[in-house]
Amino acid sequence: MEWVKDLLHELTEEGLKLGACYVEARYEKTYVTSLVASNERVERISVGIEEGIGVRVLANGAFSFFTSDVIDRELLLKQLKEAVSSAKIIGERRKEKTKLAEVKPVKDTVVEKARKPPQDVELEEKISYILGINRDIRSRDKRIVNALTRLFDSYDHRVLVTSEGTEISYTIPRIYLSTSAVAFEAGRQSWYGKGEASPEGYEFLDRLNLEKLIKLVVEKSLNLLKAEPAPAGRFTVVIDGELSGVFIHEAFGHACEGDGIVAGTSILKGRLGERVGSELVTVYDDSTLPKGWGSLKYDDEGVPTTKRTLVEKGILVGYITNRESAAKLNLTPNGGARAQSYRYPPIVRMSNTYIAPGDWSFEEMIEDIKHGVYLKGSRGGQVDPSKGTFQFNAKEAYLIENGEVTKPLLDVSLSGFTLDILANVDAIGKDFELRPGFCGKGGQAVPAGTGGPHVRVKEAIVGGRR
């Protein structure tokens, strides 16, 4: 791939000659497969190779970005000239000039190994795999009326070159498998799904306990057929690691992203050093977790990533930054710039976001609850980081009565003000679970890990179907 590096170096050098003060050129080639099977039929097959170059230039205090999936030297140089010219024009109309926090140039090659690279596994084998899961789920019980299985894999090779001397090659494989079941009986319908993923090759699926996954999905979907209407009001709730992770990512993590802080669209602007939660709450966004779904050694600006402490014992101590927001906030860049692909410029993003474990067992957390709710998993929701409000729908929920988890509940949601929830945390479990997912922002989706321990919250707002 030396020709790629040579081309990227030429683009950065030519950009400086044209008047840019900074040029960042990224090449990417990705092998991608996406399969969906429903009710033992393949519903969608997408197989391809995506290849191209994205270039971002900073001139006259403004950014300009272009991308091309046609790797032609003359065309790229023409686009570069236009991009520098555009940045200069934009900069002339800007009162506040964009600046980048200083970083040390890095030269490195990072290869996440795959014993069975995704592109080396035959398509027929992948199709057979997901159809087999579908058939198995459907055969377990006549009340299972639908099964959906998704398989996504990629083998991504990226090269980053900057005008400051950074040169990084990155190779990372990914496998993501999810499956769900819909159960129906006597006019009642329920759903349950679960996904597993890892940044490696198909050896991940070879060691995955597929029987355990299928059994879980089937049993949960059937059990939810027995669910009863949930109470509504304020209760002491216990939320599992999956839901606590989604909460801390969506409701709090996005509010810690430096671009939102700069823009004034976050409730956490100007609050570094202030209490934002119970002293039991410590929150990390950690890009360094081994085999973490959102882990990366370097971000897409070439900045080394870190284990970012966002909250320490209830005190807000950090934000997630890229070089631009770090400069505006007078902070050190901590490797928070990520791009979905070469088609997009890097923006501030999370990696693996979670609440740190405490020292409570699950039994200790529920033993003194006379009437509460146990919430597990997430089926989506909505947040407003500027107002600090949220609403999440639990994947499953159960009543807690006199210290015991009892009957399942229908369509339960958790809502309220983010900082109220964090302030009312009065117990954190010693368990820990990190789940894989994809986070959307600015029209881009990137792999992100979420999770944590069980968390107990007083006076939480719970809603349910009446």
Image: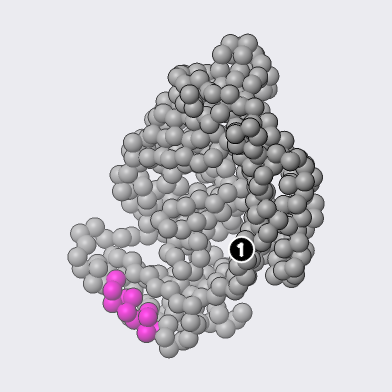
Q: Relative to 51, does residue 286 appear above or below in the rendering?
A: above
In the image, taking residue 264 as reference, residue 406 lies left or right, namely: right
Q: Secondary structure at mark 1?
A: strand
Q: At which x and y percent is residue 446? A: 52, 56
In the image, taking residue 349 as reference, residue 367 lies left or right, namely: right
Q: Relative to 445, does residue 3 appear above or below in the rendering?
A: below
Q: At which x and y percent is residue 279? A: 50, 24
- In terms of depth relative to the viewer, which is nearer, 48 or 23? 48
Whether the magenta-drawn stretch holds residue 361 is answered as no
Q: At which x and y percent is residue 262? A: 32, 48
Residue 130: image quadrant is: bottom right
Residue 403: image quadrant is: top right
Report if residue 148 is visible in the image.
Answer: yes
Q: At which x and y percent is residue 15? A: 38, 78
Magenta stretch, main secondary structure, is helix
Q: Relative to 236, does residue 175 appear above or below in the rendering?
A: below
- In terms of depth relative to the viewer, which is nearer, 323 or 292? 292
Q: Relative to 248, does residue 146 appear above or below in the rendering?
A: below
| Quadrant of the image containing the N terminus | bottom right
Which contiguous range is marked in magenta?
Answer: 77-87
The amino acid on which the numbered mark 1 sits, given as a three-letter code, is Arg
Residue at the spot 72% in from the left edge and 35% down from the top edge: 219
Residue 276: image quadrant is: top left
Residue beneath disc 1? 44
Residue at the spot 51% in from the left edge and 75% down from the top edge: 52
Neighbor class of circle 1 (other Cα within 10 Å; few <14, some 14-19, many 20+) is few
Colour option used: one colour
Residue at the spot 80% in from the left edge and 55% down from the top edge: 206
Residue at the spot 37% in from the left edge and 56% down from the top edge: 324
Report if residue 292 is visible in the image.
Answer: no
Whether the magenta-drawn stretch holds residue 85 is answered as yes
